[in-house]
Amino acid sequence: MRIIQATLEHLDLLTPLFVKYREFYGSLPYPDSSRAFLEKRLRRKESVIYLAFSDDDKLMGFCQLYPSFSSLSLKRVWILNDIYVAEDARRQLVADNLIRTAKKMAKETNAVRMRVSTSSHNKVAQKTYESIGFKEDTEFLNYVLPISDEL
């Protein structure tokens, strides 16, 4: 398995897997909008995306991280926002390798931490994150404020 950082040249390869990721979490596929979204993130350098390839160059999975900052520590924080492994590539430590690569990048950019969220029902992901060293945040509660089109 090899892990590389995605570039604009990987869009056509990445988009179908990104669409499957969105569907996994109950979103409609929207392949054209999904591709445009990824293209903007890469073109504007607003995210870092890592791709995992098999030895025969098949895309096995990806993760996408967004930069943020901690005012309390005065350092960078990386948000592991998206991670997905193709169904036929599961149980091959793809997620582990993607996260380890992301962790290495976080260290190289002097980040204070990486953050990740997952569905409370996704026990497989929770177990993976914990096995790599993520800890459940017991210091801060997280809240969400939905922003709608209505005023």
Image (spheres, grey):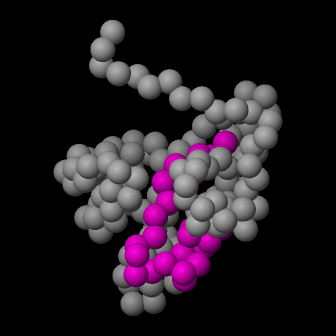
Q: Position of residue 3 (x, y in %)?
A: 52, 73
**The C terminus: image quadrant:** top left
Whether residue 118 appears in this view of the structure is no
Query: Is residue 124 placed above or below 22 in the rendered structure?
Result: below
Q: Which residue occupies 25% across, 53% down?
A: 29
User: Residue lying farthest top?
Assistant: 151
Q: Does residue 106 belong to the magenta stretch? A: no
- Apparent side of residue 53 relative to residue 141 in the rendered image (left or right): left
Q: Which residue occupies 40% across, 75% down?
A: 87
Query: Is residue 139 placed above or below 61 in the rendered structure?
Result: above
Whether residue 1 appears in this view of the structure is yes
Say which of 62 and 85 sits in front. 85
User: Residue lying farthest left?
Assistant: 32
Range of magenta residues? 77-100
Q: Which residue occupies 46% across, 70% down?
A: 85
Q: Position of residue 26 (x, y in %)?
A: 35, 51
Q: Does residue 93 belong to the magenta stretch? A: yes
Give the total of numbered labels: 0
Q: Position of residue 41 (x, y in %)?
A: 39, 45
Query: Is residue 53 placed above or below 28 in the rendered structure?
Result: below
Q: Position of residue 124 (x, y in %)?
A: 58, 66
Say which of 60 and 53 sits in front. 60
Query: Is residue 121 placed above or below 94 in the rendered structure?
Result: above
State the image quarter where residue 13 is shown.
Answer: bottom left
State the image quarter where residue 23 is shown.
Answer: bottom left
User: Residue lying farthest bottom?
Assistant: 56
- Apparent side of residue 61 relative to residue 40 in the rendered image (left or right): right
Q: Which residue occupies 75% across, 43% down?
A: 137
